[in-house]
Amino acid sequence: MYKNSGKFSTYLLLTTATAVILTGCSTSQSAGNDIKFTETPKAKVDKGMENQPESSYWFPEDLLAWNFKNDLDAKYNVSTIPLAKRVEKKELPKANKTQNDEMNVVALSIMNSSTSGNAPRGINNFDANVFSYWQYIDQLVYWGGSSGEGIIVPPSPDVIDSAHKNGVPVLGTIFFPQTAHGGKIEWLETFLTKDDKGEFPIVDKMIEVAEVYGFDGWFINQETDTEVTSFDEVKNGKKTEEKEKEKKEEGLRKEHADLMQELIKEFKNKSEDKLDIMWYDSMTSDGKMDWQNALTDKNKDYMVDANMEPLSDSMFLNFWWNTEELAKKELLKSSNEKAKELKIDPYDLYAGIDVQENGFMTPVNWSLFTDDKGNPYTSLGLYVPSWTHASSDNPTDFEEKESMFWVNDESDSSKGKLPKGEEWSGISTFSVEQTAITELPFVTNFNLGNGYNYFIDGEKVSSMEWNNRSMQDILPTYRWQFDHEKENKLDATMDYTEAYQGGNSLKLRGQMDKKTPSKMKLYETKVNLSKDVTFTTTAKASEETELNLILGFVDGSNKTIKPDKMIDKDWTTVTYDMKKIRNKTITSIDYEIISQTKSDTYEMKFGQISVLPKMKDDKILVKNLKIEDAIFDEEESNFAGVRLIWEESRSSNLSHYEIFRVNKDKTRTFLGATPANNFYINGLERQKEETKTDFEVVPVSIKGKEGKASNSVTMKWPDNTVPKASFKASRTLIAPGESVTFNNTSSKNTDSVTWEFEGANIETSKENSPTVTFKNPGVYQVKLTAKNKSGKTQVEMKDLITVDDKASGDLKLLSKGAKTEASSFVNDGEAPEFAVDGKLDTKWCATGNPPHHITVDLGSIKTVSEVHIGHAEAGGEGADMNTRAYTIEVSEDGKDFKQVTRVIGNESGETVDTFAATKARFVRLTTDKPTQGSDTAVRIYDLGVYGLK
């Protein structure tokens, strides 16, 4: 997944125990666009602190016990944007002859890289999957869930907001994993449990979550089975081990299938058919894990009941219809026929294509998807099209892959044509571009929902990275269609270096002849212009430019309207006279660009398009701003994580809120923007010698005008004037004459340190990383004093260094192949013995609620002094899966353990923890925070205990 190269992130030890005094002030001021800014610096902490709100995820028993009021994060997970109305497909023009207005597209996308640890509306880093090709999909499934985190996953609110703004419904995921990946039949049975009334309690919770969070239904993927344990084995034609002919009572059976169908029916009835269910083609009607890859008699009962009444709204068909082995069966054609036989719309079936690994390089036999005239048999289901983000190295790479995937290799859907063979021709080949611009006001700043900077009215107010997809605007319907005259040629890209409002603008760059027009097709619409409409466009250009507006109408005609002035090198807002276009419905917004001089390096940037009806000048107020919670880094209390909440503005004119730090000189430092009435400030850095920080929130209208600021609230910082002393030793068990390097890890406010070494070649040192030699055998202590002008602290470690003739050379690996025990493990292939086999392609993995522990039996009592751990990244997994907090304990008898190491802020994939040499037979590793986020699964690829044999 791409990240800003060269960015150095620091993650600090955190505490919720630090006292903080929060006060509220009654003062406020009128902002009104006259705020003076102090530019926000780049962030030094860009990973979520411990009190970061988190997007929800549950196991079935957790959801059953869930209560919105008792969930401190729940309010942060509520979407603020209702589902926009789209223009009916049949009313829309087709960009090419192959587009079909009956078929649909669903995207099962990984919108966040993990199930857990996701900030509801982003934090202060750039990296986010800012998918924006909403015009090509009809539904988004927020794909997530794992046996180590949770299997019921509602979409995060930023994804709901951006999708709804574009008229796309969003489904959460209910994912019962295969047992090979940690799935448990108990989770399925809890999900399908009835109460005394014969109803499913989980149904009420499914509806409650969808309604209160504001999304549109659920995708159900049931793949847990004790007999068929692996999707991959079945795909590759491998037979699972023979079981007893009759399934065990605890295994998957027909009763589960019957209950699932009842549950779907109850859900649809209780939700009054307002929420959708999409069923995944996995479990058959007789309770077997048997992917059909089609609509058949074995899975039709999930679409219609015995009385031919509808159940699920749609079905996602498994991917193998596209394989060579099944091609002769023409499964999509037969699905179309079966659907018509059952009086089901064939386009409620989605032919799955797995693009997770290869994206637009995925081979697809398109002749199986369409008839000989190019008409699709079913709709299209894309599994993990978020490949475009995961495989990209930078924003440009992402943008190019998105265009290739969704449009075509020419970035122009008007040039679409049916694919040849197995080539990828772009989703625009089949999918009609849709629009949700059906009412006014309409304002776009071309925001994707992230940025390296933030701009307000063209002024750069922040150089801090950010992401918040709730702030994404409606992006152009057509990417990109030009009609150039003469030698004109322009390319379009998103520009993160400059914006008018937000994080980016739309940049055009290329060659322009003098006074020679280039037309650019941008937006499809269906909106009525009232008599008092104001239409403006804000842009800037390298050359003086005439930017003419071209509006299309229902009757197919169009009108070109000249601006009131030219675009120049600074941001310029031009106005178009709309008096002659009153009470007309416009169907498109396009532009004609005419440079007044010839240029081979012409550049123009669109900053904003604004179409506003006459609006009441409602006062937009922010009331009762509060600090809900604040924590500070444990190391020095120089960084804070702050939760702000306030009363929601009731004005229909509200666009969003801006959050500011109020500085001593009365300037404001921008901290973020959101449409919600809450905000999380992550990694706020204390200013030099600052003892308190004031915050305020300013509402912003749809017109872009800042309203009256809220009351300010004050956060007091903890006293961190005295330094905290700490250090690490490179080795603690050595032979006479060997050296040890000590590293000062004291708090950053330390001005100087003094070391005291017992038995070493030097008694004291003031260096940060002294290397000292111990000549004689013995056991020695080390003391470190950290000082600054406010005081000093000491840390003294007795018997830390052991000097022994037996320790000459490298310490011995004592744990390879040793007997191990663990609190739990996922399956036999991820058992605890794989942590000590000396390989980095095997691991111990345990799921469920932490802590997880693994104990190594060395066979007899040994002298131990180091533990080397290979965390998730050492085995090739993501760094976000590295163990965050863990404890190492030792014991001679396996009963009474003593702690030798405690780590609470690890980020590394490989760690070496040294401690005073001690006698032990048993070494226990306990992980209480198994990952960097909230994934509760521990992954240990190597566990090496070192010492003397």
Image (cartoon, rainbow, N blue to C red):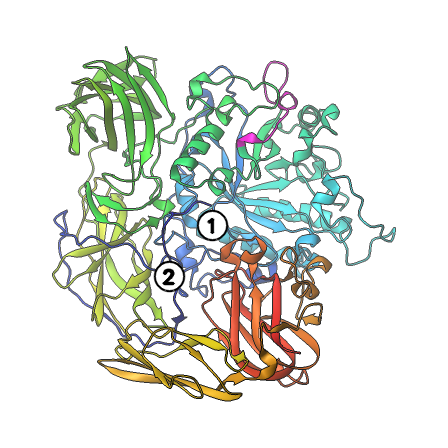
Q: Looking at this view, is 346 or 265 the one in front?
A: 346
- Give percent across and percent down for residue 658: 25, 51
- The answer to whether residue 365 is left or right of residue 113 is right
| Chain part drawn in magenta | 360-376
Position of the C terminus, as image quadrant, is bottom right
Q: Looking at this view, is 200 or 565 the one in front?
A: 565
- The answer to whether residue 13 is left or right of residue 227 is left
- Give percent across and percent down for residue 139: 50, 36
**Disc on res. 10:** 2
Q: Is residue 612 shown above or below 746?
A: above
Q: Is residue 861 shown above or below 467?
A: below
- Give percent across and percent down for residue 185: 70, 57
The image quarter containing residue 486 is top left
Residue 367 shows up from this direction: yes
Earlier in the chain: of badge 2 and badge 1, it is: 2
| Numbered circles on residues, count | 2
> Residues at badges 2 and 1 in contact (C-beta under 8 Å)?
no
Q: Looking at this view, is 215 or 141 the one in front?
A: 141
The image quarter containing residue 133 is top left
Q: Looking at this view, is 69 or 852 the one in front?
A: 852
Which residue is painted at 32% across and 39% down in the image?
447
User: In terms of secondary structure, where does tag 1 sit?
Assistant: helix
Q: Is residue 753 magenta?
A: no
Which residue is painted at 70% across and 27% down in the image?
331
Amino acid tagged 1? Glu
Which residue is painted at 16% across and 30% down in the image?
569
User: In terms of secondary structure, where does tag 2 sit?
Assistant: loop
Amino acid tagged 2? Thr
Q: Is residue 721 shown above or below 142?
A: below
**Disc on res. 211:** 1
Which residue is painted at 34% across and 13% down in the image?
555
